[in-house]
Image (cartoon, coloured by chain):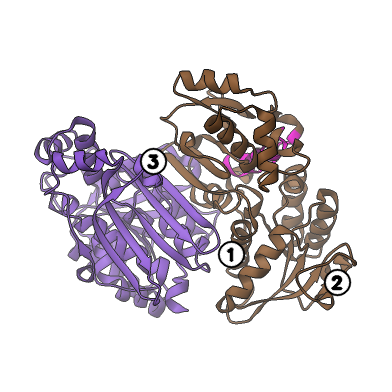
Chain colours: A purple, B brown
């Protein structure tokens, strides 16, 4: 545990949307008592918002720097992210990541590495941006059986479906608008094809049910073939089409996970979650229905989740994986 | 910290709705590894759902019993609750309470007693039942400035307003229905007069802003004088009347807290929170808008919050009161 008194020295790996968001937040919060001591990026020639001498170009140097208390890994490349995070954990370090694909593909190893070497990995920012869903499932509902966890885990596809519903437009024009406004990537496959929410579902099922799945074991159907006519059909029945991730405990005890377009009626709190927002519904054995809504992406909201993880590390927090180890 | 391996031995003080709810949950969850070793109640002659020999009639005996790991205080009487909880804390014990009036009226002393004697008090169940709002404010948003926290903290008054809106009825008949269905107390003053949500607002403002207020410093206006005509007036503008608790940081840095009937439009997530449900909207500096919804009362939902506190105690969790001590 890092002393509450000292200044937390951060090594930041990656300076894209989330990295800059976190940097900006920490600049605005001197009372948090953290300093970004080193920033590692890949491309030495790219123009950036900070002076060139603020950057390192060898992330590995940060992993072994004893003057850094905690590492924050926020790069895009999932394979390189796993190499860096697993090396850091092998060195017993404390590290925060936002990389959902990396966590989803390597969760069993990441859990083992923490147990074997005493390091800590937190990744609240990897699922639903600013919504504290991993911590809520891992800690708050860590002892309570859950009937289901479902939600809208992808703001880009939700934005497209919202616009199709509002405008009566087809998929193509709605996607183009989302891309123009920065709510969807140039290559929309990960989001629209439900690969991104599939990764998030794999992470949540580990904390909600203690089940470690490979993303390939989860059915994901995207929204690319949804038409304006489908939306009208849903609306005629008072419903909307949403890209819903479903995690459910079946009567026989098995857990099923899938991400598909589903009809959602006004009785569900997901019905009112529009555009880039994310939402999660938890059906718990005793607490009954719980609902959380917030921003699933963006530099500040995602940076806010990283900030919470940094504060949690300071207080010795680690995921219990209660249901996994039970 | 209590070892994860051992069975948690609980001393339960009070066996009303929440006490029985918790007892029932623990019966259904042997894997939680807790045993209710002693139960203290006030009235020796009252008929109860457990055999008479399960009960003690002197709560003080539990406070000093070294064979109990943790105490759970869930009695109605706020003065007696404070006497018991403060005595337990003076003995350095770990205790969970659900008594919002007691916590709201004595928070400064309760914080001091924990610091002075090393005991721990958790009280998630005291605000919005099963919604993990205290922990979310204390831990997850412990480092982030919040613009506002607002919500529907009282299921009874929300139920009455919902029924008035649905039926076009006046306050009296809607209250009578809520009382008949168990959604409102025989003496409705605490709920309908907004004294209950005022206590909850006082608790949340301590965790959200580090401000310790006495409930008397918070304006509370009830819903007793709301008429069917008022509801129609709101509806004509596309709005509903809700009993909203508002915690806000003003531009000059001061924090203002009040609980009053307010007009709520469909753009607010509180608009769709109906009947006995509670909801909380957090407007955070970086995470932006967060919303949580769940059951604010009932034996199982409130017992679920106590269960989470018991699990948290086991892992050494205590409120940081970050913003208070900062």
**Host chain of mark 3:** A
**Chain ID for label 2?**
B
Q: From which residue to which does the magenta span run?
A: B193-215
Q: Residue at x 48, y 42 (%)?
A: B144
Circles 1, 2 touching at the beta carbon (< 8 Å):
no
Q: Residue at x 75, y 66 (%)?
A: B93
Image quarter of the C terminus of chain B: top right
Of residues B85 and A225, which is closer to you in this image? A225
Name above or below for residue B204 compared with residue B34.
Answer: above
Badge 1 density bin: few <14, some 14–19, many ≥20, Cα 10 Å: some
Residue B319 or A289: which is nearer the viewer?
A289
Query: Which residue position holds label 2?
Result: B56
Same-chain check, marks 3 and 1: no
Chain of the residue on which disc 1 is drawn: B
Between the C-alphas of marks 1 and 2, the distance is 27 Å
Query: Mark 2, residues whose alpha carbon is within 10 Å: few (<14), some, or many (≥20)?
Result: some
Residue A241 image point, x, y percent? 25, 46
Name the front one of labels 3 and 1: 1
Residue A167 at x, y = what percent? Answer: 19, 30
SS class of the residue under badge 2?
strand
Left/right of residue A82 with respect to residue B246 in the rendered view = left
- Per the rendering, the mark at residue B312 is 1
For residue A149, side relative to residue A76 (left or right): right
In this orientation, which residue lies closer to the viewer: B325 or B44?
B44
Residue at left offset 73%, top offset 48%: B103
Q: Which mark is residue B18?
A: none
State which mark lies toward you, 2 or 3.
2
SS at circle 3:
helix
N-terminal label among 1 and 2: 2
Which residue matches tag 3?
A25
């Amino acid at each position: 545990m890092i002393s509450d008194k000292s200044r937390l020295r951060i090594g930041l790996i990656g300076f894209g949307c989330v990295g800059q968001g976190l940097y900006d937040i920490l600049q605005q919060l001197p009372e948090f008592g953290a300093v970004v001591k080193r920033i590692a990026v890949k491309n030495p020639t790219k123009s950036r918002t900070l002076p060139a001498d603020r950057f390192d170009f060898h992330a590995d140097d940060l992993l072994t720097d004893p003057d850094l208390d905690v590492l924050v890994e926020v790069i895009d490349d999932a394979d390189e992210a796993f190499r860096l995070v697993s090396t850091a954990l092998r060195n017993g370090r404390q590290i925060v990541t936002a990389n959902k694909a990396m966590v989803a593909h390597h969760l069993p190893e990441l859990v083992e590495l923490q147990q074997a070497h005493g390091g800590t990995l937190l990744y609240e920012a990897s699922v639903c941006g600013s919504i504290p869903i991993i911590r809520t499932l891992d800690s708050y509902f860590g002892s309570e059986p859950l009937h289901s966890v479902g939600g809208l885990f992808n703001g880009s596809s939700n934005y497209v479906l919202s616009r199709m519903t509002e405008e009566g437009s087809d998929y193509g024009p709605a996607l183009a608008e989302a891309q123009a406004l920065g709510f969807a990537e140039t290559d929309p496959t990960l989001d629209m094809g439900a690969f991104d929410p599939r990764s998030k579902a794999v992470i949540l099922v580990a904390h909600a049910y203690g089940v470690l799945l490979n993303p390939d074991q989860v059915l994901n159907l995207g929204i690319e073939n949804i038409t304006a006519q489908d939306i009208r059909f849903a609306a005629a029945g008072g419903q909307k089409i949403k890209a819903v991730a479903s995690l459910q405990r079946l009567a026989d005890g098995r857990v099923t996970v899938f991400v598909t377009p589903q009809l959602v009626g006004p009785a569900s709190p997901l019905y009112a979650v529009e555009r880039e927002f994310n939402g999660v519904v938890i059906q718990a054995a005793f607490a009954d229905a719980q609902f959380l809504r917030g921003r699933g992406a963006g530099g500040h909201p995602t940076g806010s989740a990283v900030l919470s993880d940094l504060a949690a590390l300071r207080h010795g927090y680690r995921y219990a994986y209660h249901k996994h180890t039970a």
